[in-house]
Amino acid sequence: MRTALKYTDVHKTYNGVYAVRGMSFSAEESTSIALLGPNGAGKSTLMNMAIGRVLRDPSGGAIEILGSDPADESLRIKYLSGVVPQDDNLDEELNVFQNLYVYSRFYGVKKAKALLRIEELLDFMQLSVKIDARIKELSGGMRRRLLIARALINRPSLLILDEPTTGLDPQARHMIWDRLNKLKKNGTSILLSTHYMEEAYRIADKVVIMHLGKKLLEGDPVSLLSEHIEAHVIEIKEKSDFSGSVRDAAERFKARVDLTHDTVMVYTDDKSVMRAITEDLSDGAYISRERNLEDLFIKLTGRDLD
């Protein structure tokens, strides 16, 4: 399988301050890779580098997107890619159909093919009944779906999405996840950034967790969880409840405890340890659950805001 994108020891500085420092990762064709990190981690900078909107430092490593260097062949990469920006930039003076048709002209799609493609994409994103609607009449979820449809007008080999479902309700989010997975199965490579850990887990074949411009971990979500985080989590809602026999049990069984905020997080690989720790807690005082990507993310990047 060929490589869709590859970053090798990439650096980017602004006024002497590193936005990206020594980033290396890659993704194969027809797979998806998610960039995870706090605000300011460098995710958007890396994504903008993919299409040549931001250039890496002159001695800042190498980038290959669909076989080309974006510093030299950004137009070719843009022609083969589709981009869904974080900010909504639909033309509100046009209706749904016109937004898509105008975009098709940028890629030189002939009218007959454009009409068929628009019909196909509106059906794919469940927007057919809104074909004549003004942009101001669309809900937030519909606008995000239209942005994705617009990015697919040229049948891109690579789809780049910057926080594609931020602010959407669960129904819209799950619908978009379903469509992205279908695109991947049909051969589209996907690069996305997201703050939703569940989104990364459901869509990404590989995740890159980064912080302050540096890569902390890279790998498939299931393997990263099994290798770097305990299997079971107890969330004790009040710090005052983590005392006496509860604290003693956690210390006795060497469970990992996070006391950063009011909610106490206790991590362990042993279910019997969970029972021992929660034995003297009332049912409403805690939540017990399985680990997830958010636990790993917090463990690596910390709970405090940058």
Image (cartoon, rainbow, N blue to C red):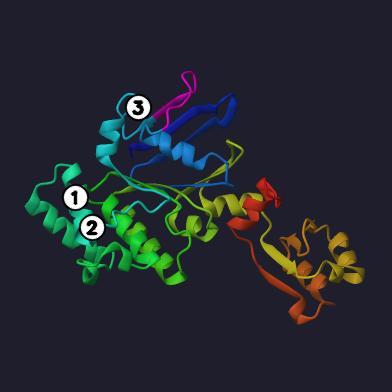
Left/right of residue 232 with respect to residue 79 in the rendered view: right
Query: Residue 300: percent from the left, percent from the top?
Result: 66, 46
Residue 266: which quarter of the image?
A: bottom right
- How far apart, in angstroms, are the residues tagged by discs 3 and 2? 35 Å
Of callouts 1 and 2, the N-terminal one:
2
Tag 1, which secondary structure?
Answer: helix
Is 265 in front, or is 143?
A: 143
Residue 74: which quarter of the image?
A: top left
Q: Which residues are magenta?
A: 54-63
Cβ atoms under marks 1 and 2 closer than 8 Å: yes
The residue under label 2 is 94
The residue under label 3 is 69
Of callouts 3 and 2, the N-terminal one:
3
Q: Nearer the viewer, mark 3 or mark 1?
A: 1
Residue at 40%, 61% (x, y): give it. 177
27 vs 175: above or below: above
The residue under label 1 is 102
For label 3, count other residues whose C-alpha is less than 10 Å away and answer few (under 14), some (14-19) or many (20+).
many
For label 1, count other residues whose C-alpha is less than 10 Å away and answer few (under 14), some (14-19) or many (20+).
some
Disc 2 marks a residue whose amino acid type is Leu
In the rendered image, residue 62 lying in the magenta stretch gets the answer: yes
Residue 145: which quarter of the image?
A: bottom left
